[in-house]
């Protein structure tokens, strides 16, 4: 069974498995899902399951309590489904305010197209709902690092080295995958931190499966899709 970490990037999506020596880029999630066989599990940095008038995403509340003050801002508020599908920022914010009693930030709007892409894929193919699971790199790094959030911003060289050093404690293949990927693809298509985030989710998924941790959640949206930010807590298993 292949285990794949996925992060959004300028090209579309970057996907990586620790069993490969390089990441892959895909224009869309439909192509990505078709590339891998039916046994593959995915951990993706994008909200799965969207809030509605009577249903909250409890996972965000938990994650914000865990992250340090420096890293809390990396967790964008998740819009309702109707807002994610809106055609303009103004319309999306208006809809979200009507349904969730709050507007949406420009940062949230910038990822709405990817939220919609993933949501449409899972609604159109229910079998994929059990194979695509959500995580968040800063939350995942926090728990891999004994509940200590990353010190440096992921866009900086110090932040990237900090994260790669941590991931290398879990797999000797991290540096090989990272350097092969940055040599193969242009920075205009995928940034260094995108690759590192995908590697983080690949490591996290490997540890989740290795330790037989459930990826199911009782918190579901109004389409019965699980809402859970998955991570591996090394303190519990150390």
Image: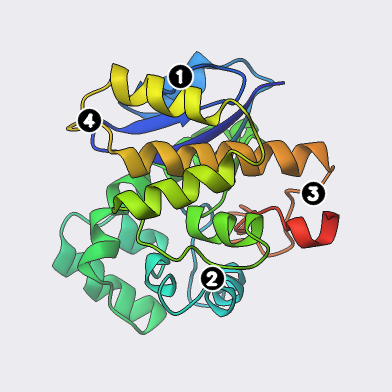
Query: 157 or 78: nearer the eye?
Result: 157
- For the residues labelled 3 and 2, the Cα–Cα distance comes to 18 Å
The answer to whether marks 3 and 4 mark residues whose Cβ atoms lie closer than 8 Å is no
Residue corresponding to mark 2: 60
Residue corresponding to mark 3: 214
Q: Earlier in the sequence, mark 3 or mark 1?
A: 1
The residue tagged with tag 2: helix, strand or loop?
helix
Q: Earlier in the sequence, mark 2 or mark 1?
A: 1
Q: Is residue 177 above or below residue 221?
A: above
At x 68%, y 63%, the residue is 146
The answer to whether marks 3 and 2 mark residues whose Cβ atoms lie closer than 8 Å is no
Query: 97 or 163: nearer the eye?
Result: 163
Instruction: Answer with the quarter of the image where residue 70 lies.
Output: bottom left
Q: Earlier in the sequence, mark 3 or mark 4?
A: 4
Q: Earlier in the sequence, mark 4 or mark 2?
A: 2
- For the residues labelled 4 and 2, the Cα–Cα distance comes to 29 Å
* Residue 22 badge: 1
The answer to whether marks 1 and 4 mark residues whose Cβ atoms lie closer than 8 Å is no
At x 30%, y 33%, the residue is 12
Q: Count residues near mark 4 (Cα–Cα under 10 Å), then give few for <14, some for 14-19, many for 20+.
A: some
What percent of the width, then of the height, locates residue 210? 80, 37
The residue tagged with tag 3: helix, strand or loop?
loop
- For the residues labelled 1 and 4, the Cα–Cα distance comes to 15 Å
Left or right, 108 with respect to 180, comes to left
């Amino acid at each position: 069974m292949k285990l794949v970490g996925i992060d959004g990037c300028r090209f579309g999506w970057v996907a990586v498995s620790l069993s490969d020596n390089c990441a892959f880029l895909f224009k869309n999630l439909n192509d990505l899902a078709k590339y891998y066989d039916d046994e593959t599990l995915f951990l993706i940095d994008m909200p799965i399951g969207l809030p509605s008038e009577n249903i909250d995403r409890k996972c965000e509340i938990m994650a914000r309590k865990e992250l340090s003050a420096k890293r809390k801002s990396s967790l964008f508020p998740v819009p309702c489904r109707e807002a994610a599908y809106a055609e303009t920022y103004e319309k999306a914010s208006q809809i979200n305010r009507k349904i969730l009693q709050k507007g949406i930030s420009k940062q949230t709007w910038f990822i709405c197209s990817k939220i919609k892409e993933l949501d449409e894929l899972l609604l159109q193919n229910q079998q994929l709902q059990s194979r695509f699971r959500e995580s968040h790199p800063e939350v995942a790094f926090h728990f891999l690092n004994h509940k200590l959030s990353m010190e440096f911003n992921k866009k900086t060289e110090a932040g990237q080295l900090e994260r790669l050093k941590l991931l290398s404690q879990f797999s000797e293949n991290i540096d090989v995958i990272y350097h092969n990927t940055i040599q193969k693809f242009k920075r205009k298509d995928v940034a260094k931190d995108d690759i590192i985030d995908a590697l983080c989710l690949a490591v996290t998924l490997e540890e989740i499966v290795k330790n037989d941790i459930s990826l199911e959640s009782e918190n579901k949206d109004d389409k019965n899709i699980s809402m859970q930010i998955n991570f591996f807590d090394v303190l519990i298993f150390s």
